Amino acid sequence: MILSLSAIFSSCEKISIYGQGNTITVQKNLPSFDAVETFGDIRVRIVQGNQEDISITGFENLLAVTETEVKNGLLRIKFSDNIRNVINSNVVVNIILPNIKAGTMHGNGDMQISNFTGGDSLSLKVNGNADITVRSSVYDLALMDVNGNGKINCRDLQTLNASLVIHGNGDIALQCSDNLKARIYGNGIVRYSGNPVLDVQISGNGHVLRL
């Protein structure tokens, strides 16, 4: 009985992994999706294109524990459940999509979204210290949420209306032309350009500043 319990605990033990060795690229064949969520120290590059394509580049030993799954239009990218900590991560996920509706990051990674135009809404969320950047894109509505110390940089995103929430010390920057709603709980900062009608509530030492 003791031996059996020892085997169970050993198999459930989480480990740290150090990225090293050969850098390889793996092509993925996945169902269609229009939202991306990542967990851990992973970099994501998403650009607009007519045909979906996804590839992952990184150290071979890290790609062996990098998992992808699509469910209900959401692509989830994460390291295996038995990995506690990834050191020296160089994992980069390159994605081509016709449309992206949402991007969410948990942890310390970063996401770049580029060249999407004509979209109805874009939802962005950061939990932790991750960064999301949007470049050369146009959406009618932007929804942004930062929990922690992360940043969302949308200075190069054109949007008519935006609704923003920051819990903690996060930072959001964007362009907005019509209506901007901001809720800050803590020391977060919202920076904006344009001349929107402002609806601002701050609990703490946060700020809403014009760029």
Image (cartoon, rainbow, N blue to C red):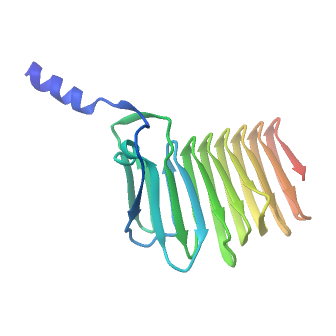
* Residue farthest to the left, as pictured: 1
The x, y position of residue 169, in whole percent, is 73, 37
The x, y position of residue 126, in whole percent, is 61, 48
* 90 relative position to 83: left or right: right
Q: Residue at x 52, y 42 (%)?
A: 41
* 39 relative position to 191: left or right: left
Q: Which corner quadrant of the image does residue 115 belong to?
A: bottom right
Q: Is residue 44 above or below residue 129?
A: below
Q: Which corner quadrant of the image does residue 10 belong to?
A: top left
Q: Is residue 132 above or below residue 32?
A: above
* Residue farthest to the top, as pictured: 2
* 77 relative position to 195: left or right: left
The x, y position of residue 8, in whole percent, is 18, 30
Q: Which residue is more in the foreground, 35 or 143?
A: 35
Q: Which residue is more in the foreground, 186 or 19?
A: 19
Q: Quadrant of the N terminus?
A: top left
How many marks the image carries: the answer is 0
* Residue farthest to the front, as pictured: 22
Q: Is residue 43 above or below residue 28?
A: above
Q: Which residue is more in the foreground, 124 or 199?
A: 124
Q: Residue at x 68, y 61 (%)?
A: 143
Q: Residue at x 83, y 35 (%)?
A: 205
Q: Residue at x 44, y 37 (%)?
A: 19
The x, y position of residue 12, in whole percent, is 26, 32
Q: Is residue 156 above or below residue 16?
A: below
